[in-house]
Image (spheres, grey):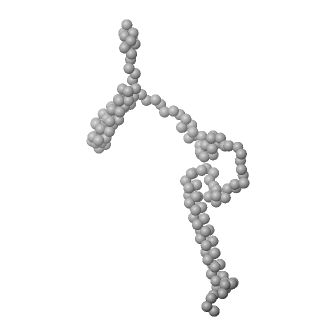
Amino acid sequence: GIIPEYGEPSYDESINHEVYENNADIQLELECLKKLEEVQVLINKLDFEDSFTAEKFVLYDDSKVTTEMISDDEILKAVQPNNPEKEEIEKEPLPTITHNEVIKYYDKVILYLQRQKNNYGSNDEEIKFIKKLKKEALRKHFCSTKQINLDNFVNVIE
């Protein structure tokens, strides 16, 4: 008749629906794989010594609930690479250089560049930049010096 009968879908409709669901599942699987690849790229950028897969990261067992807090040192130890040589190098403090020493070094560099103009092709802009750095060092030296109290000055002279 004119009104369609509602009931069981035809064989062709069942197959089409099944193919559609399979395609949707495949699309979801491809989407998941693509996201796992993106996560793996990010994990690889972290450059861990003991690297792990994105799948292992995503499927990490959430049933392991801990009640104790991890200390900051444990977190740093887990994240930072185990390279004792690098740590020793970083622990050595840089030597202190006074403003007067820096000003002398700048004078030497300026003199050197002025004498070597032909050999190195250094231009006036580079020399001006070094002079600007020297001027900043002079300013910091001036600001860091303590003003002597006039009473102390008089006591030193007497």
Residue 29 place in picture, x, y as percent:
62, 68
Where residue 141 appears, as percent x and y from the top left, is 38, 27
Residue 125, visible in the rendered structure: yes
Circle count: 0
Query: What residue is rendered at 59% in x and 45% in y?
Result: 80
Q: State which quadrant residue 37 falls in.
A: bottom right
Query: Left or right: where does residue 72 sit relative to residue 145?
Result: right
Residue 135 in the image: above or below residue 76: above
Eyeballing the image, is 25 above or below 48?
Answer: below
Q: Nearer the viewer, residue 35 or 15?
A: 15
Q: Is residue 111 above or below residue 150?
A: below
Q: Residue at x 31, y 35 (%)?
A: 131
Question: Within the image, what quadrant is residue 58 found in?
Answer: bottom right
Q: Quadrant of the C terminus?
A: top left
The quarter holding residue 84 reads top right
* Left or right position of 15 against 150: right
Which sits in the foreground, 11 or 77?
Answer: 11
In the image, residue 113 lies at what x, y percent? 31, 37
Residue 87 screen position, x and y as percent? 57, 39
Q: Quadrant of the N terminus?
A: bottom right
Q: Is residue 94 left or right of residue 13?
A: left
Please give the name of the residue rendered at 62% of the width and 53% of the height, measured from the top-left corner.
Answer: 51
The residue at the point 63 percent across, 71 percent down is 25
Q: 104 or 59, which is in the foreground? A: 59
Residue extending farthest to the top is 158
* Residue 112 seen anywhere in this rendered image of the structure: no
